[in-house]
Image: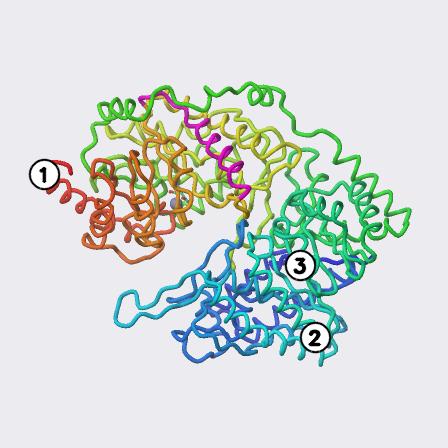
Amino acid sequence: MKALAFGFPKLGEKREFKRLLENFWRGKISEEELHAGMRDLALWRAELYRKNVDLIPSNELSYYDFMLDTALMVGAIPQRFGEYKGIETYFEMARGKSALEMTKWFNTNYHYLVPEIESDEFCLFINKPLEDYNFLKSKGYDTVPQIIGPYTFLRMSKALRRKEGELPIYEIEKIESKDQFERLMSKLVPVYRDLLKSLKGAGCRRVHIEEPALVLDTEGWQWDLVEGAYRELSEEGLEIAIFTYYDSVSDYERYVSLPVKALHFDMTSNEENLRNIRERGFPKDKELIAGVINGRQPWRANLKEKLTLLGELSKIASELSVSNSCPLYHLPVTVEPEEELPEGLKERLAFAKEKLAELRTLKLAYEGSQEAMKEVEESQRVMELSFGENPQVRKRVASLTDEDFRRDMPYQERSKIQRDILKLPLFPTTTIGSYPQTEEVRKTRTAYRTGKISEEEYKAFIRKQIEHVIAFQENVGLDVLVHGEFERTDMVEFFAFKMEGIATTKHGWVLSYGSRVYRPPIIYGDVSRPKPMTLEEITYAQSLTEKPVKGMLTGPVTILNWSYYREDIPKREIAYQIALALLDEVKDLEEAGIKVIQIDEPAFREGVPLKRKDWEDYFDWAVKAFRLCSRAKPETQIHTHMCYSEFNEIIEYIYQMDFDVISIEASRSKGEIISAFERFKGWDRQIGIGVYDIHSPAIPTKEEMRVVMERAMKVLPKELLWVNPDCGLKTRRWEEVEPALKNMVEMAKELREEFSKVPSG
Ligand code: GLN
Ligand code: ZN
């Protein structure tokens, strides 16, 4: 049995990758130094792989994003970038003014660059797999290139259509028509053949082709294309292994009959792959690569169970390899430096480096090593201990009834009460929560967290910021105010710090795109709230003004989707636990006189399963979790906020969340969201459609923002409309925020004057 691994995080133990890139962008190091640094990282990775597994992957270290690299490999460069001039054009495509669109990679938190297919002329343009193969070979590593396959490449790309004389001058859209897909695939496969030829010429014997898109709902004609493509590719005489991950393959029979040497399966995201292998068997002439070590969750594996499973699989498949379930880059590099985790947690964790070691142990134990067997027993002992339990929390969740998921009064009635209390004008104005996180704010927060300033000093500093932002909002003339979120590093990590059952790490960085990193919290036990989390700041802000200040919480679905989570209880239960902790906060805020509470759910869309058949179950608990935490009294106006996803398909589920007001981003996805409301009959909730894109430093004019409002008024009654930016303002500067919001408020006032004269209709 071979052990193999792929997708090890490129960040480096000390975030070397990030530093290299950013130093290069800032002009602190030369291009040559950048390449040299990357080569060091490549060698470090190759050595780590060699110590643990039998096959060393190459072509994994992208300078920005592997989908961008694949686009360049096949020569898919939109005309607007001009002639390709090396690294300059590369970063122009990645992060320049007219960069490629960035979006979530499957259901993960990694963002990839969406290749734009402008013509169907492909060629082997930048042969990075070959360069990488040759480089590592010259250093003594015989590697297996990991390559994104042609089907996944096309499914995750968009076609670019140029429009003459109109604005915007081009449009991109998913490649969905059969004809178009077929045509592109037929042009792409020869390029992949050239690639394989060149690798073979260099002495390479095996390639790993990643086709995660085969776990998405894939139609018969798409399978035909995949089969045809691999039939052709296998003619090049290299050993081909196909990798699928993040879910089970969408059609087992078709997958196992693909004409290739080896097939990889994700055995951790659900049971389906395993069930299929058990029930339908596996072809005798193929190698089965069992992805049994979870690449997405940071738990140490119960190796005893895995070993038993491998034993079983070895009877079904004539050739067996063991691997990780999906790329390891969803995990931090190593748990080694984490010194401040809750007692007993560290030994339960395995990040990427530890996962490599697990693969090694599994292989050695499988081959009969006594020492490895001890490790296997130890992992079983540790992982079978119960951990982080809180019987009260369990009991509370177990005793939930339908009542707990329903507000006491229907929207139509409670909205009248809220209207009388809040007395807001037509087109009320508000912001989404955060205000500029200046250098000073960030420094002071770090100084507090590292013990350089006292809690007293820190709190006084935050109070000053709140005073300033309240005065600012009153001055601008906003109707519903916020406290600015200056005390929060990140909207999820902030609550993770405060909740029991969720740990945060000091060094557990993961790339979310380019050089951007974040530290996902780890939900390891039953979740509860030992004491109020936001009360102090919100009530202080409210004490400074007559206008309503919004209580500001991050919703249960978002906290769960942006964290690692335990796997011993269903996700539904974890979501309810978090929701109950948030409900306690909602109650405290109400008690303290807060009249409007916003519960953000920007990750609501992201957790949606890859296959349609799994949607119902997800939305059932996700909607309920939101309803559970937002079960406020009828007098309290509940807001939610969502952004930067495609909502059209899920608008019915969003409606079921039963909030009073939603603010939703629209300026990027243009009019799309508005057309969703056109189709939705009976929408009666108040809604703030983002009138300007907070990701752009440009200051929006009244006219630009009015366009969004006018479009919205075509499909929604004006009484339902709020006026707000499309997301929080924390990445902007005060110099941008002030004129932008002034314009926004003025635009709202003008609309108000015009429309309060004419009757609705
Ligand atoms: N309330 C948060 C903020 O304003 C919302 C952020 C988000 O949607 N990602 O920053
Ligand atoms: Zn947002």
Classify mark 3: helix, strand or loop. Answer: strand
Quadrant housing the C terminus: top left
- Alpha carbons under labels 2 and 3: distance apart: 19 Å
Q: 136 or 716, which lies in front?
A: 716
Q: Residues within 10 Å of mark 3 (few under 14, many from 20)?
A: many
Q: Is residue 208 above or below residue 387?
A: below
Image: magenta residue range: 613-635
- Alpha carbons under labels 2 and 1: distance apart: 72 Å
Classify mark 2: helix, strand or loop. Answer: loop
N-terminal label among 2 and 1: 2
- Alpha carbons under labels 1 and 3: distance apart: 62 Å
Amino acid beneath label 2: Glu
In the image: residue 44, left or right of residue 543: right
N-terminal label among 2 and 3: 2
Q: Is residue 630 above or below residue 146?
A: above
Residue at 65% from the left image edge and 34% from the top image edge: 342
Amino acid beneath label 3: Phe
Q: 85 or 671, which lies in front?
A: 671
Can you tell which quarter of the image residue 151 is in? bottom right
Residue at 27% from the left image edge and 25% from the top image edge: 418
In the image: residue 639, left or right of residue 113: left
